[in-house]
Image (cartoon, rainbow, N blue to C red):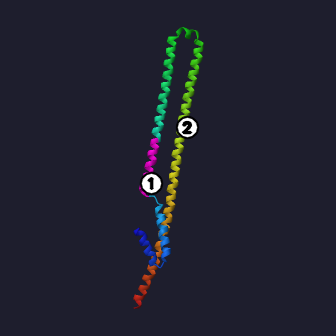
């Protein structure tokens, strides 16, 4: 607020009409509100790092959980198969050919489930990488936007400096001439 008042006073001092000086001050204040501070950027970076870590932890947890479920399913199916073999050994002997085909199907299903699990893990990894890449691109775009806003602010401050210093120099020159003539 103090800078705004100083800017307004400086503009009115150099004979800028009050309504135009107020418009310049309002425009300058609205531009200043759009700039991110260093702490804002650090907070955003910390948030992004936390999000990436959290997503990695979730992915690891999901992989571990799916692996445990698959091991449990395999263990459960193996236990059931052994129990059936013990209980029905006579029937199993007569149907050994059928059992061989069933065990082949079981292996195929396990392999298919393993392949599906691997494909799912790969797909999630690709999605995670693309999300990270996308967030990185958005972050770079936001940094580029802030750089362009900084350039505009520098130009505005330069123009403001010229607008203030030229009349002051002219006034000093006029006073110097008056003093040297007297």
Q: Earlier in the sequence, mark 1 or mark 2?
A: 1
Residue 104 in the image: above or below residue 145: above
**Residue under the image location 51 percent in, 49 percent down:** 136
Q: Which mark is residue 110?
A: none
- Which residue is nearer to you in this view: 122 or 15? 15
Residue 47 on the magenta span: yes
Location of residue 178 in the rendering, given as x and y in whole percent from the top left corner: 42, 88
**Dot 2 alpha-carbon crowd within 10 angstroms: few under 14, some 14 to 19, many 20 or more:** few
**Residue under the image location 56 percent in, 22 percent down:** 107
Quadrant assignment for the C terminus: bottom left
- Which residue is nearer to you in this view: 166 or 88? 88
Location of residue 45 in the rendering, given as x and y in whole percent from the top left corner: 45, 50
Q: Outermost residue toward the bottom?
A: 182
**Dot 1 alpha-carbon crowd within 10 angstroms: few under 14, some 14 to 19, many 20 or more:** some
Residue 159 appears in the picture as rendered:
no
Q: Which mark is residue 41?
A: 1
Q: Main secondary structure of the magenta part?
A: helix
**Residue under the image location 50 percent in, 64 percent down:** 151
Which segment did they paint magenta? 37-54
Location of residue 4 in the rendering, given as x and y in whole percent from the top left corner: 43, 69
Residue 56 in the image: above or below residue 40: above
Q: CA distance from mark 1 to mark 2?
A: 31 Å
**Which residue, given by chain and number where applicable, does mark 2 sit on?**
123
Does dot 2 land on a helix, a strand or a loop? helix
Residue 44 on the magenta span: yes
Does dot 1 land on a helix, a strand or a loop? helix
């Amino acid at each position: 607020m103090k800078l705004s008042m100083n800017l307004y006073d400086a503009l009115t001092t150099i004979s800028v009409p009050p309504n135009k000086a107020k418009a310049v001050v309002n425009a300058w204040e609205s531009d200043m509100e759009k700039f991110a501070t260093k702490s804002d950027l650090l907070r955003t970076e910390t948030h992004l790092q936390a999000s990436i870590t959290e997503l990695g932890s979730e992915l690891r947890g999901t992989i571990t959980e799916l692996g445990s479920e698959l091991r449990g399913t395999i263990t459960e199916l193996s236990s059931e198969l052994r129990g059936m073999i013990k209980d029905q050994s006579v029937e199993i002997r007569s149907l050994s050919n059928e059992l061989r085909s069933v065990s082949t199907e079981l292996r195929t299903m396990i392999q298919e489930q393993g392949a599906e699990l691997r494909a799912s893990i790969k797909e999630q990894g690709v999605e995670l990488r693309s999300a990270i890449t996308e967030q990185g691109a958005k972050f770079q775009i936001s940094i580029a936007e802030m750089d362009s806003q900084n350039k505009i602010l520098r130009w505005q401050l330069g123009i403001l400096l010229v607008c203030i210093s030229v009349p002051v120099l002219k006034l000093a020159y006029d006073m110097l001439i008056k003093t040297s003539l007297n």
